[in-house]
Image: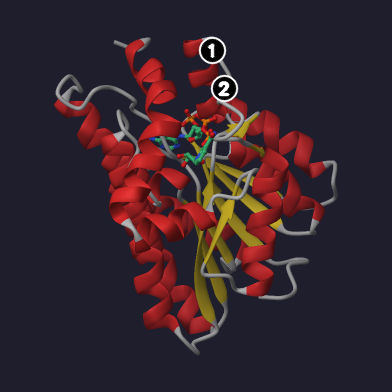
């Protein structure tokens, strides 16, 4: 989808963190916005700010773990704007803990919010996009979906599920005018999840793991839509070569990932225990 002006975007998890920065960037592109998250008041504050950019903004309080809320979200957005041209499945939660200690309820919630909600919301939006012959779905995955992180097993599983789901969609949607992309940020500064981990550990990621800005993630969303990219890894230093190495040489890849990430991730998990 090359032109975004006056088209409609539905963004989940838009009340703070990456979702908020993505919403701002899409508003600057001239998109009208439907913003979803659980906290109605925060959403309203965000909407008031974004309306000053001259676009239409509606807020729809939604718990993405509830199927009825997801159906209502799609109905309300269509009622308000007529179409949904872009869906950004961004709402997400992290659960960094040693896997043998993680609460079963946290495993279920992580998969429900990050993965099941992404599939269901896409399922509800897609028929309308196909009917219009136009649309794009952006799934906010993570580098944790490219290589499962130690101490973040449920989170990594949900994010790799999002990447595989995006690939399946692209295979099905070829030449329909509708497409999908996965965005895979590393640790995102001024994104909420990383800031929580940084506060918990008292440490930034080591330089060789790097990080990204929320603005860079938002730029990647726009690039993915305009250029119909399958997936974009957003991090400095670049990590795609490392993931390619992991595919080609699994044992060497595993050693590199373990050596560079395990200590930091263990710290992130242990502070939560
Ligand atoms: N920050 C990073 O370093 C990083 C890196 C890679 C990928 N990501 C991914 O990027 C996305 C956004 O992360 P973030 O760091 O911006 O997180 P965040 O600051 O914690 O924000 C999460 C957003 O999701 C919403 N949310 C959470 N549970 C929800 C639910 N059940 N129903 C509806 N909305 C819900 C929150 O709003 P309410 O609480 O009001 O509902 C909030 O708007 C996530 O999918 C995350 O996995 C983040």
The quadrant of the rendering that contains the N terminus is: bottom right
**Mark 2 residue element:** helix
Q: Does the residue labelled 1 lie within 8 Å of ligand 1?
A: no
Percent across and percent down for residue 145 are 38, 49
Q: Locate residue 40 relative to residue 225 in the image: left or right.
A: left
Q: Indicate if the residue with disc 2 has its beta carbon within 8 Å of ligand 1.
A: yes
Depicted 121 relative to depicted 92: above or below: below
254 vs 23, nearest the viewer: 254
Between 225 and 187, the one nearer to me in the picture:
187
For mark 1, give the secondary structure.
helix
- Judge whether residue 117 can be spotted in this image: no
Seen at 45% across and 51% down, the residue is: 73
Taking the spot 18% from the left edge, 22% from the top edge, the residue there is: 103
Res 146 seen here:
yes
Judge from the rendering whether residue 218 lies leftward or rightward of residue 132; answer left or right: right
Measuring from the top left, give residue 104's x and y in whole percent.
Answer: 15, 28
Residue at image x 31%, y 46%?
158
For label 1, the residue is: 199
Measured Cα–Cα span from mark 1 to mark 2:
6 Å
Q: Nearer the viewer, residue 4 or 271?
A: 271
Residue 195: mark: 2
Please give left or right for residue 201 compared with residue 188 in the image.
Answer: left
Evaluate if marks 1 and 2 touch, with contact meaning CB atoms under 8 Å apart: yes
Q: Nearer the viewer, residue 126 or 161?
A: 161
Please identify the quadrant where the C terminus is shown.
top left
- The local crowd at label 1, few if under 14, some if 14 to 19, many if 20 or more residues have their Cα within 10 Å, is few
Q: Is residue 77 above or below residue 65?
A: below
């Amino acid at each position: 989808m090359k032109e975004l002006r006056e088209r409609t975007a539905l963004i989940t998890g838009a009340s703070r963190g990456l979702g908020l920065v993505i919403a701002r960037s899409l508003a600057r592109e001239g998109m009208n916005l439907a913003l979803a998250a659980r906290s109605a008041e925060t959403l309203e504050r965000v909407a008031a700010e974004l309306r000053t950019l001259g676009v239409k903004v509606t807020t729809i309080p939604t718990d993405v773990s509830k199927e009825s809320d997801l159906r209502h979200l799609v109905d309300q957005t269509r009622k308000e704007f007529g179409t949904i041209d872009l869906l950004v499945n961004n709402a997400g939660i992290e659960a960094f803990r040693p896997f043998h200690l993680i609460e079963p309820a946290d495993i279920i919630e992580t998969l429900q919010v990050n993965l099941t909600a992404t599939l269901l919301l896409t399922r509800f939006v897609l028929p309308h996009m196909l009917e219009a012959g136009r649309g794009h779905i952006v799934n906010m995955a993570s580098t944790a979906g490219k290589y499962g992180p130690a101490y973040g097993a449920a989170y990594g599983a949900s994010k790799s599920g999002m990447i595989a789901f995006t690939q399946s969609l692209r295979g099905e949607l070829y030449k329909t005018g509708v497409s999908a992309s996965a965005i895979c940020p590393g640790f995102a500064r001024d994104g909420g999840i990383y800031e929580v981990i940084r506060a918990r550990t008292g440490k930034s990621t080591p330089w060789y793991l790097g990080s990204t800005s929320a603005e860079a993630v938002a730029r990647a969303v726009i690039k993915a839509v305009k250029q119909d990219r399958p997936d974009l890894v957003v991090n400095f230093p670049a990590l795609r070569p490392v993931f390619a190495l992991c595919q080609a040489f699994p044992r060497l890849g595993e050693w590199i990932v373990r050596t560079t990430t395990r200590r930091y991730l263990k710290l992130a998990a242990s502070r939560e225990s």
